Each structure stands twice: as C-alpha cells, then as structure tokens.
Amino acid sequence: MIYPNTLSSLFEQAIRIAFPEDQTLPVVVVPGRQTDYQCNSAMPIAQRLTAAGKKIVPTEVAKIIVANLPQHEMIGKIEYSGPGFINITISATFVSKQIRNILLKGVLPPNVLNMVGNHRSQNENKKPKVVIDFSSPNIAKEMHVGHLRSTVIGDSIARLLEYAGFDVLRLNHLGDWGTQFGMLIAHLQDIYPEYKTKSPSISDLLSFYKESKKHFDSDLDFKQRAYECVVKLQAFDPNIIHAWKLICDVSRQDFEYIYKELDIKIIDRGESFYQSRMIDLIKELELKNLLKLEEGRQVMFVPGIDVPLTIVKTDGSFTYDTSDMATIRQRLIEENADWLIYVIDSGQALHMQLIFAGAKLAGWTDGKNVRMDHVGFGVVLGEDGKKLKSRSGETIRLRDLLDEGIERSIAKLQEKDRHNVLTFEELEKAQKSVAYGCIKYVDLSHNRNSDYIFSFDRMLDDRGNTAAYLLYAYTRIRSIARTAGVDHALLKAMIHDIDLNFEIEERELKLAKCIIKYSDIFTRVLDELLMHGLCEYMYQLATTFTDFYDRCYCVEKDKTTGKIQINYRRILLCEATANVLKQCFEILGIQPLERM
C-alpha cells in the first residue's frame, strides 16, 4: 500500500498523471545502493505500454515520470542510470527538518489508519479496530517453548498497531473446552472429592493432566465417567462447571506468571466463550443455504478449495471448524473489526484460508474494507537442527527457558563487571532486560516464516545483530550527553537554536538519513507484518551510529588551550538516534535501560 506524504506517493501521482490511460501501472520505489532511493517503474511500464501497442523505451518513460513529479522539499537531486532507473537524493534541508521534528515532537508514526476500514483520516474519532489472536495455550497444560513464537510475535504486532493509533483488542483464544475436560473433571472428583466447598491445591497441573490421561487410557469405568462429565459440561451442569472453572483458574495462574515476566498484555477469551454462538452459526448458514450433507456430515464448501469445512459431524457434535467459524463471525459482526490477525503456526495455513473464505462467503465482510491475515511462523530448533527439546527429550517448559535466560544474563553482566558498577535495583532490571530482550529479539529478528535455531550463546553475544549488542549500544548513546555534563532540559531548550546542518560532515548526514528512514521501515513492516524488518533497521542504525561516533567527536579538548568544546549538533544527533532506537525497542516489547 502507498501512504500519503511519502516518496512513493509522489511517484504514484507522477505516473498516474503521465499515463492516465492505465491507472494500474506499477509504482516501485526502493532504497538505493549508490543513492538514497531509486524508482524502478520505468522498465515494467515500458514493457506494459509496448505490449499494448505504444512502443516506448524505459529511458523515455523515466524522463516523462520525472517531468510530472510534483515539487516537494523531500527531493534534493534526481539523476538517471541504466535502462530508466531514477536515482533520488533526499534534500539535506528536509533531513534536518525531520531530525528537529523527532527531537521536538518525539518519534511519531506515519498516518496509516486509512489502510483498513472506511476511515479516511487520523483525525476522525473512530479508530479502525484490530482483533489480534495470539499465544493461545491449552488449559491444563503448561506453556512450552512452542508457545514462544505466537506470544512474542503477536505482542510485538499488537504494540506496532497500538503505536500507529489503531484500536487493538488482544485476545488469548484459550483451549478451555472439549472432551479432554471430561477426564480432568473426573480425576478432580476422585482426588479432591470436597472440591465443591474447598478449592483444591493443584500445584503441578501437568502431572495432574498426565495422571488423568493415564486413568482414561487404562480404566474403562473412569473413561465412562469422563464421557458423562463431558455431557454434563456441555449441558452447563453447575457442579461440573464449578470444577471446570477451578481447573481453568489454576492454569491461568501459570500463564499469568509468563505474561507478567514478558510484559504481555492479553485478554482471555477461550473456546468456551463461543459455544452458544455455534448454534446461531448453524442457523445462519442453513438459512443462507451454505451447508451441504455429505456422508452424514454437514459441510461448507468455499470457492477455490476442494476440502470443505466440517460444521456438524455425523453424531451431531461440532468441530474446530465450527468453533473457528463462530469465532470469526463474532469478531466481524459483534466486535465490528476492520482487521483480523491470527498469529498461528504455518501448519494451519490451509485451515485459516478456509475460515477466511468461509467468512467472506457468509457475507460477513460485505461492504467493509476488512483485512484478514494469518501470521504464520516456523519452528524453534535446537542447535542440533531438530525441534528444541530438553536433554530428556521432552518439550521445554517456557518458565524453565525464562529462568535459564535470567541465569545466563546474570553471568554475562558479571563477566562485564556490571555487578560492581550498578545498584542492586539497576542490576535486577538489567538482568531481565538482557534475558527477556535476547529471547524476544532472537525470535523477532528472524523471518517468522522460517525455522530458527535457538542458542543462548549466540543471542547473548554483544557482537552482531543481537539484542545484547543493541541494548549496550543504546545505553552507550544515552550516556554521551550525561558524560559530557549536558543537562537534558537545557539540551531540549536548545533544539530550536542549534543549526542542524549535517552537510558539514558526511557521516553526520549519513546517520541523519538513516534515522529518518524509520518512517519507511515502519510502513513496510506494518504492510507485511514481518517484524524482522524492524530488527534489521535497528542494527543498521546502531552500526551507522558507531561509524559516525568513531570519527565524529561530540566532545573535544582544544590541544592549545585545554578547553573542552561540546558539539551540540552531534549531541542532538545522538539523542535522535537513541529516541528512534527506544521506540523500536518498545514496539518489540524490549525494555532498554539508560544505565547498564
């Protein structure tokens, strides 16, 4: 999507004016290697026009595009290269203005609220609503490393959308209903017969689950009682519902510990919430003649996919398809969402295609500019290239992974002698910042569609594209003004008066241009929902800053007089760099520190 007030929007205007006969001609503006940006539209446009009978060469197309380009302070210089490439240099005056805006107003998001819904501007009272479904562990089972990706990716995307100004509803679609609760409730009745009046002390829910499963598989009487409990649960028997709530509450305590440690905000809304809505779903689909009888099942076929959705089984019971169709219906109709995002592993791709297509076929998106995304992701691997497991071959508990992260970060900080420099409170914050920051960043810095290898040694390395490197870089940048004795309030008061002419020094201008690329990176990440693009930008910004700082002194001592001279323009450039990095950290859900 092309957003207003961007270089792409200027070239789109030029192309539409220059070639009005075809309003679908491509607009391709990308970062350049030898220049700031490059418009590569001329060649595909020339090919399209020639195929339509209007023979023209790419170099001529490029000149026509530039001739129709609106005047804008952003554009400093335009040059041509190769077969119609248009090279754009951003104006140094525009760069200075953008840096000053960052320093005065903060790191603001571009106006992107018109990308979904029927909302025209950021000033309208109603914000587009996004419902994002992520994490989604199962009740009675502990969160394990397999839940890490959905939780971290989902939280980061939610933060991105909230920062952009969307109305975001973060939902935890808990597995809190189904036949497995029959055996859990039956086991609860056996172990804690007084559960109706006294809350059971279930400390190890995983063992409780395994014990109930063992009885279910080996004891026919127990299995029968478990089935009876399922029937009573579905009939909302008060005593069975009470037992069900007790089991759910124990699970939630474990989940809440994880969410609190990782600073994840999420609202629980499990499968149980949609049970009554499934009846209404069946009625609506029958009324719209969307259900077909096939081998005793009621199924729903969607365009372009051979596999149908199974809505009602032969025995009259419902399926995951039924539940998920009721869920998406509730989000589109009751929540009136403009954008639905499901952060679920890539193995569910076909299922999500079916659900999205089913929602469209049912008419729930008619007349709305609704966007629906399945944000898929790969698997977390161990250093042996196989699924990450414990030494005993079991799936690693997420709580154990976080604990090991803390232990490793403590060792890393002690290695750097930070325990002798920081206060106890500062050291405690640094431990969590490094541990949880590294765990989140290693996930987010990889393309979510790919598997990645989980290695504490690599992620805690303060060299290369790691959270450890970026956190230390941020702390170092923040210390520059403090070490120079520059008062922060005074520095802010000087922003209007300091001449921000970065053309004086090549590395200053390079850093300043890297800083203002943030807006372009943000819109691309939002379009693609690929957070690794933001991580790559953070690393590029940090390394560009290092190159600047190594050659451009912010504080200098006059060799003759011994007088200390502070270059406030460069100090302000350091502040702008830190401000942008901090905003990126916040989007990723990582807590940077001023001192570490």
Image (tube, helix red, strand yellow):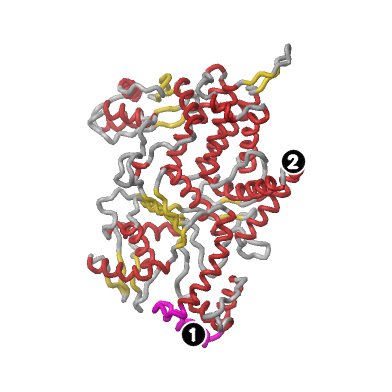
- Element type at mark 1: helix
Residue 558: name its quadrant.
top right
Say the numbered circle drawn on residue 421. Answer: 2
- Element type at mark 2: loop
* Region rendered in magenta: 217-240
Please tell me how crowded label 1 is: few (under 14), some (14-19), or many (20+) other residues with Cα within 10 Å: some
Left or right: residue 118 versus residue 483 is: left
Residue 523 appears in view = yes
Residue positioned 34% across, 39% down in the render:
123
Please tell me how crowded label 2 is: few (under 14), some (14-19), or many (20+) other residues with Cα within 10 Å: few
Residue 544 appears in view = no
Residue 432 percent across, percent down from the top left: 64, 50
Main SS of the magenta part reads helix
**Quadrant of the snapshot with the C terminus:** top right
Residue positioned 41% across, 20% down in the render:
78
Left or right: residue 560 versus residue 375 is: right
Do the CB atoms of the residues marked 2 and 1 lie less than 8 Å apart? no
Residue positioned 64% across, 53% down in the render:
383
Residue 477 percent across, percent down from the top left: 62, 32
Q: Can residue 368 be found in the magenta stretch?
A: no
Amino acid type at mark 2: Val
Observer-nearest residue: 456 or 117? 117
